[in-house]
Image: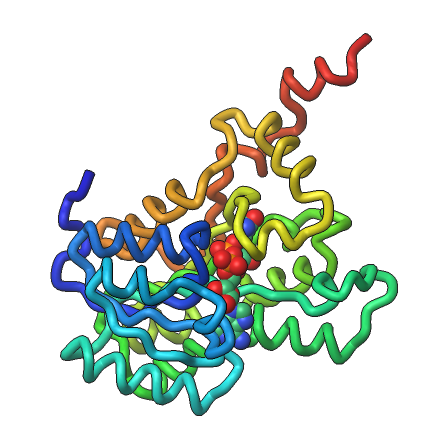
Amino acid sequence: MAHNLLKGKRGIIFGALDENSIAWKTAERVYEEGGRFVLTNAPIAMRMGQINELASKTESEIIPADATSEEDLEKLVTQSMEILGGKLDFVLHSIGMSVNVRKGRHYTDEKYDFTTKGWDVSALSFHKVMQSLYKADAMNEWGSIVALTYMAAQRTFPDYNDMADNKAYLESVARSFGYFFGKEKKVRVNTVSQSPTPTTAGKGVKGFDGFIAYAELMSPLGNATAADCADYTISLFSDLTRKVTMQNLFHDGGFSNTGVSQEVIERFSE
Ligand SMILES: NC(=O)c1ccc[n+]([C@@H]2O[C@H](COP(=O)([O-])OP(=O)(O)OC[C@H]3O[C@@H](n4cnc5c(N)ncnc54)[C@H](O)[C@@H]3O)[C@@H](O)[C@H]2O)c1
């Protein structure tokens, strides 16, 4: 159900690869709520993905940009303002990739070139995106910037590998940049810490099926889906959350505050 919560707002959405992507679901919901945006992804992902379909459904233009390239990001920000006809109100950073995970390297056997690349893509890119927006003075007052994260930043999940460290960095960048963006431009910056979700990035984590089933049993409300995450992000882009900033917001059906659930106890009872 749409409420026109984002009517007249403009933005950029990073990371829609296919219809399972959290960014894809978010783009659909933003469009329903009246927001207009530019879609972007890494040039290589454009060839693999189905982003054209999403663009035509949401009347969006696509600008390829590698989120690790300052030059690409500068162009993206300038061109987006030209296309959309003004400064931006919302930005979604929905980007993650670990080369160590992809290549099956254990956390105790990282190849540091891989670590650095994964950190650049998954964590530093958030700083680069915000610095590009900040320097171009591209955000309207009371705008909202959201990045997606996972609870492995706070607690250990062995197979999450170096992505745990990347997420801890990402969440710290949200707080640090959130201070300056708040002070200077009245823009809010938050991270949403989402339940395990069956997407290309999610399924790349070893043991994902067992892990998502465990999280489902441990969460009083059940796992939050990608569609649920899109709804939550809409609220953060809307004018209803103007004073929420520099937060890591758990969107996980209660998983993060549950010690154990009855269902899990029963599995271990005779
Ligand atoms: N799926 C989960 O279980 C889960 C849980 C919590 C948080 N998250 C986070 O949600 C975000 C979105 O992931 P998803 O689950 O929708 O998976 P996804 O695979 O659909 O999205 C990841 C996106 O990152 C993009 N990307 C990779 N390298 C890039 C680069 N250099 N420049 C620009 N874009 C690049 C990919 O092309 C892809 O579109 C990630 O930050 C992920 O860590 C996912």
Residue 2 lies left or right of residue 266; in this view the side is: left
Residue 167 lies left or right of residue 143; in this view the side is: right
Q: 17 or 268, which is in the foreground? A: 17
Q: Is residue 3 above or below residue 147?
A: above
Question: Residue at the right extreme?
Answer: 109
Question: Which quadrant: the C terminus?
Answer: top right
Question: Which quadrant: the N terminus?
Answer: top left
Q: Is residue 216 above or below residue 16?
A: above
The residue shown at (64%, 16%) is 262
Q: 9 or 240, which is in the foreground? A: 9
The residue shown at (47%, 42%) is 251
Q: 44 or 172, which is in the foreground? A: 44
Work out whether residue 125 can be spotted. no
Q: State the image coordinates of residue 269 (x, y, percent, origin top left).
A: 78, 11
Q: State the image coordinates of residue 44 (x, y, percent, origin top left).
A: 51, 76
Work out whether residue 54 can be spotted. yes
The residue shown at (72%, 73%) is 115
The residue shown at (27%, 85%) is 79
Q: State the image coordinates of residue 149 (x, y, percent, origin top left).
A: 53, 56
Q: Is residue 202 above or below residue 246?
A: above
Q: State the image coordinates of residue 62 (x, y, percent, origin top left).
A: 31, 74
